[in-house]
Amino acid sequence: MTDFVRHIPLSWRRGAKLLPLYLAAAFGLLFLIGPLLVIVPVSFSPAQYLTFPPTGFSLQWYERFFSRPEWMDSVWVSIQVATLSMILTSVLGLLASLSLVRGRFRGKTLVYAVILSPMIVPVIVTALGTFFFFSRLGLVGTVLAIAIGHTIVALPIVVIIVSATLQGFDERVEQAAISLGASPVTAFRRVTLPMIAPGIVSGALFAFLTSFDELIIPLFLGGPETQTLAVRIWNSVLLEIEPTIAAVSSFLIAVALLVLILAGLLGRARGHSQPAAGATETGGN
Amino acid sequence: MSIQRQAHDGLAELAVPPLPRHLVRQGRRDWTLIMLLVPALGFLAVFFAYPMADILMRSFDGDQGFTLEHYGRFFERTIYVRVLLITFEISGSVTVLTLIIAYPLAFVLATVSRRTAAILMAMVLIPFFTSILVRTYAWIVILGPEGLFNQVLGGLGFDPVQLLYNRPSVLIGMTYTLLPYMVLTLYSVMRGIDAQLVRAAYSLGASDWNVFRRILLPHTMPGIIGGSLLVFILAVGYYITPRLMGGDRDQMMATIIEYQVDLLLNWNFASALAAILLTITLVGFGLYAWLVGLRTLFESRT
């Protein structure tokens, strides 16, 4: 409905009447973007403490972030966890989406609700439950345990994105390949998969980002040797406020931005706008 | 479209229209398709459903087997009941605040040109995809004792004020982190409103107020209800923001669960707390599915 505005009569569009509306919207936007616009310049501060506006330009906090082994170790742990979780989530999510979109069976609503439920269940509850589970198995503190925890949280996101992509895919193309003699598996692999690949990749990207940013699961399931970046930030924030965290935060904003841009490009490749952008980060509270 | 109607449409939309019969080897194919659910559901059964059941079991587990003592303790001690009330109070306030801020913003997003909307939408999505921890930290930098706000005050010759660790700071932080959910939900509903309705109302002489009350408000009601339920459900389980920005009187269910596990090692009582929180959330989720439909929960919004 982008034509909405053109249908609004002139008397309504004209002049001061709409000003309060636009001011309210501008306030909302400023509120949303302002804090991020503050944190990035702070991270380039040359001072030893937080100042705004910054008194100059320095990369000292980035230098500290990228040179300290404890920060880099946690980045590495986060990458391992997020990669493993991304792979697991993508495979499980793709299979489930195929079934949900194409299958005809009873109780589909229920299955869908079950798969979406980890987005709604508070992460602290999921973290507590998986903590009991993995402590019984002696796996608390392992990358695997954290990755599995994140797979639970990220699975709904992938299912939503991939099933939206699958719905946009004309199944008759695949049927045509089958009618020309391809086996169903070959037809899927050679015809469907390449066409839905952008959706799968953007699902995977959001799964990676979710895992990379999520704090509470690794807070419960991590150990001294497996502190993710989020946990490291958490511990630093609880202790003190130092500009290194501003640098790390800016780094995380950059990662999010990168994922958004890539997903946007993939969405364009798919020929329509990014579905389910609202899918990620639910309950990452 | 009524809310009820949307609820019914919920999953129907997910199904692809049936294919010509001669192209589908119906039986076998369907079985294969159903089998594809097994990995995901199996995974969730082992790593999600079982742990949830385990939490429930533990919440009834005492020294001599089955007990209600953990729940009894919760409802007998005013401190825990108060935490529950604070949780509801904060979540309710945050829901109202996000609705007030998001409504005009979503309306403008839905009415400006496509190009402008894309730019403005980026300003909603960038914070949305940034980690909650980072976004909360940004507010600590702004409001903290030596934060930016106080530096400005100091520069003007005023004494620093305590802006953190109180109710308003928790509300600011949570409203900030949850606002995008409300904006996106309202936006997706507003984009679907037929502009002809608005035009027709004006041509019949309706005032702005009447257009809002009789057309916009009822048509955006699914978004208002859906967005509010979503924000409320997510707020009830919040941990990071109240923990970092709240004082003793602003701690919510999630923070005391963590406290019971981490410091008091009181796993069974923590389980009872988690079970209560889980119940609240699931009731909210059920309401959402019933009133709005799951399909709209996180459908295409950009």
Image: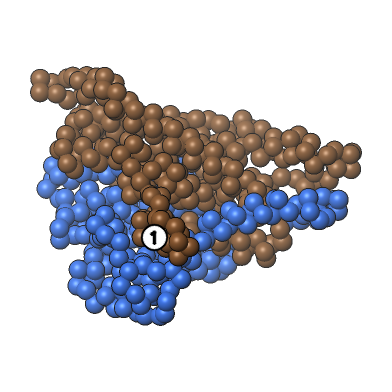
Chain colours: A blue, B brown
> Residue A170 falls in which quadrant of the image?
bottom right
Q: Which residue is mark 1?
A: B147
Bin the neighbour count of mark 1 within 10 Å (Cα to Cα): few under 14, some 14-19, many 20 and up: many
Identify residue type, mark 1: Gly
Residue B162 located left or right of residue A231: right
Is A195 above or below relative to B105? below
Q: Nearer the viewer, residue B41 or A161?
A: A161
**Residue B143 at what x, y percent from top left?**
41, 55
Viewer-closest of A9 and B93: B93
Left/right placement of residue A273 relative to residue B257 reads right
Q: Position of residue B92 (x, y in %)?
A: 48, 35
Give the camera-side residue of B87 and A1. B87
Q: Which of the pair A1/A243 is nearer the observer? A: A243
When the figure is inspected, residue A4 is found, relative to residue A107, above or below; the finding is: below
Residue at x 30% of width, y 61% of height:
A241
Question: Seen from this angle, which residue lies furthest front?
Answer: B157
Give the percent coordinates (x, y) of residue A227. Answer: 21, 59
Which residue is pictured at 69% across the width and 35% down the height? B218
What residue sits 54% from the left and 38% below the top? B96
Give left or right: position of B194 versus B19. Answer: right
- Quadrant for the C terminus of chain B in the image: bottom right
